[in-house]
Image (cartoon, grey):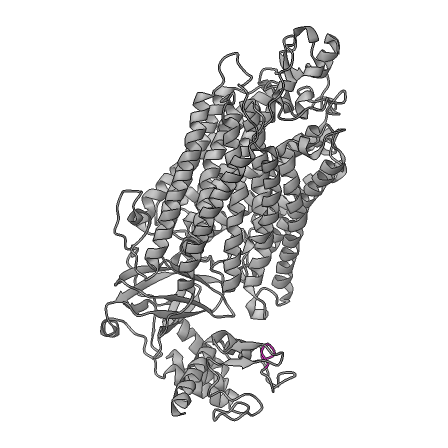
Amino acid sequence: MVDANTRQKLFGTPETNFLNCSKGWKSWAFTLDHKRIGIMYLIGVTVALFLAGIFALVLRSHLFTFDSTMLSDDMYNQMFTLHGAVMVFSFIIPSIPAALGNIVLPMMLGAKDVAFPRMNLASFYLWIIGTGCLLGAILSGKGLDTGWTFYTPYSIDTNTGVIYATFGAFILGFSSIFTGLNFLVTVNTMRAKDQGWFKLPLFVWSLYATAIIQVLATPVLGITLLMLIAEKTLHIGIFDPKYGGDPVLFQHFFWFYSHPAVYIMILPAMGVISELISVYSQKRIFGYSFIAFSSVAIALLGFLVWGHHMFTSGQSLVVTLIFSAITFTVAIPSAVKVFNWLATLYKGSILLNTPMCYALSFIFLFGIGGLTGLFLGALSTDIHLHDTYFVVAHFHFVMVGGTLTALLGGVFHWWPKIWGRMYNDFLGRVGCFLVFSGFNLTFFPQFVMGSRGMPRRYASYDPEFQAFHQLSTVGAFVLGIGILLSFVVLVYAAFRGPRCSSNPFRAASLEWQSSSPPDFHNFIQTPVLTDPYDFESQVYDEELDTYIPREFANPDKVAPRKEPVHH
Amino acid sequence: MNWQLPLMLAQTNDSTLEELRKRTEAISMQGTAVPDSSLVREGTSNPFATEYWFPTQASSFAGEIDFLYMAIFWISLIFFVAIVGSMVYFCVKYRRKDGVIAPEPSSSHNTAIEILWSVLPSIILVWIFYVGAETWFEMRIPKENSEEIQVTAKQFGWLFTYEDGDQTNELHLVRDKPVRLIMQSEDVLHSFFVAAFRQKMDIVPGRYTYAYLEPIKDGVYRLSCNEYCGTGHSKMKTACIVHVSEEDRKNNTKWIEAEKTPFENGQRIYQIHCSGCHKVDGKAATGPALNLIWGKNETMIDGTSELVDEAYVLDSIWYPEKHIVEGYGPVSKMNSFKGILDQKDVDYVIAYLKELKKSTGDAK
């Protein structure tokens, strides 16, 4: 048993931590600490989110009236292209893995850092260079008007900055590969002693599945974009029919990456939700192995369904039929996760704080996003709905309602761990409510518009859609205010929030055994391996006002352990 | 008129050619004004009704698509209400009471229930897939005796060419008359979409794509480009008018009349470019005879079989190495006509081949 002083040292607020152990900009710019890199990533993706969010608000403002002249057609096309490209490549793909995952994953394994710290830092700098090139399309004065998909032959014909942007996306791909490779090796080689695969938190499983996709699929995008650049400059005759190429081939290559990329976006989000639901219900996650294997199943099946983006593209009928059939199989592991989360809530001890509110919003919004996928997986209905606002609404429900919601939930969950300070929970929940309601107001009307035949990427539209577009625009601003409020709450908490203890939420995964903020080396002493979903292993310590592993507790003050319930 | 184009092409007089191309463009850009809202809807404010979600059902398969949509809608609604309902119920019932953090014990795993909620949705998904695929076959396989209309899409307008060679900038169809749209693009990707028909197909430069439908309700509908194609994408829309009868269409349409039929144009191109090597009397020459090949399954040198359709003819004229008929190998003796004959000229050749098949076929 450990004495009070040791407990204070391990779980109290230490004098030095990873934030104040060294000072000056160089200590950040050249840091190899996964936590600092994670924070820099978080700042980076937040900037990208705000930038692309502003593009979105400009788009929505333009669409407030059916014959709006706020933007010219060209400006509108550039605006939606940049919104999509920046959101996808610079924000959402790195958001949860590279920012939150970087901070949390090594600590969940009880490790000091990731396997390749220098590669980790390189990944961040590649992100900066890649995003710079992407935005170079704007700075060059040419802009970019191809849509984020860069479909040929338009992307070859247009005079806008396609080369800057595709080169940027190419570099961002390497940034993503570096993160993925790092995580794969870290999880394989750096787990705590005796921490088997089935003692890993589900967030680690989902990051591992994500990393597999990042490493296997991203190179295909890289090569495709290079070939696009080659076609545009050298006319090699692969994607443009003018030179004997085939535009549908580009679509195959593009979606071979970009569909698995959808799972790069959503799998880590599902991992976050598994953690939140379990911790804030204080209950062992229901069906651990089903959730773990469903992540892997989604990652693998995700490679086989890219053709469902191309049901109307002119690909062969047989191929289309097969892609539709496989697409439906992806629905099963996704549904299994949702049912397991619900079963975890059952008879839990549910705390409705900010992270949990985001987790519950996720189930609501991802539920709609997933179910509307059925309309698009079925062949006959997809033909009608393809490339309409229905699709726009569907993927925003998954990407924003899913990933962004989970990112915010995860950030609120781990924020006290990162900064050692607590946020204002009431304002956090207000922010969550605004994000949730603003989001629904923005995107739900788009399902109706899409079903009635409103094509996407239209700068002007038929007057009959105006009322729906106006609801959508109002919703977008509410959503924007919600995100801004959450941002303010978080930033204020990081600098001015009340000090908090090492484990205020009674979580059992290893990262909560470090002090808040964690030491530079994460743990002062080797953490005690606990089952991440065994909440009985945590006991309350009055002196420290926090939850600590039973092994560290004062035996006089702790009630004997109840046997954990299995089966 | 633009119909002189292939003939001028044959004479390869560049300046005349350029002028004619411009005139063709001018014609295809003069769209007739489309009413602001041609998306006809019955309209209802009840969000559980089919009419709330969809425009008029103007094609033979629209009803089936709407049925599947509404079936998925109800299935989703039931699942969604069950999921969110139980979530809210649990959050109220099991919310953390002051001071009591540890929950009452409950199971954390149950294989039977896990398998149940994996298998039950799977069965529903199989049904959705099946119904979706069934209707989709109907949408992707042409009906017998379909009228054939050539659709030419370009930034940012539409041109429709009918069997007799006349053209329009709006699509004019006849009620209950099935149609086969043979589509081509002059520049980038476009997509044919009429919401009232629930039919959509991308138009891909350098190849033919097809869309099939049978209008069942007369009216004026919106036809829009649904694949992003550049600056004027959102302006690339026109009207699709379904007439009650053939006479109605003939009399109430502003035709861009053709001076020559596509067959005559095709015959001219044949005489200038093809007749040296391809005969139309059934006898093989340097290349196969052309009089009976349309719609035939040709055997290739590698033993495979290829149907002679629009795509085959286009490939054979632009990329002669692609399909080499048995007996004419091992390499093609034909030069590529890409850059000499454009896709419209190939349309005329196809019209000629069809006519040849009809006349010589009948003679036999």
Is residue A97 rendered to the left or right of residue A488? right
Give the number of callouts. Answer: 0
Image x and y of residue B248, in percent: 22, 71
Is residue A525 rendered to the left or right of residue B148? right
State yes or no: residue B357 in magenta: no
Image quadrant for the C terminus of chain B? bottom left
Main SS category, magenta section: loop
Q: Nearer the viewer, residue A375 or B173?
A: A375
Image x and y of residue A454, in percent: 38, 51
Image x and y of residue B256, in percent: 32, 75
Above or below, A166 relative to A5: below
Q: Residue furthest top?
A: A556
Image x and y of residue B228, in percent: 46, 57
Give the residue drawn at x 39%, y 92%: B363
Q: Look at the image and tell me whether residue A352 can be seen.
A: yes
State yes or no: residue B321 in magenta: yes
Give the residue drawn at x 48%, y 30%: A360
Q: Look at the image and tell me whether residue A31 can be seen.
A: no
Question: What is the magenta range?
Answer: B320-324
Give the residue drawn at x 67%, y 49%: A216
Q: Nearer the viewer, residue A23 or A292?
A: A292
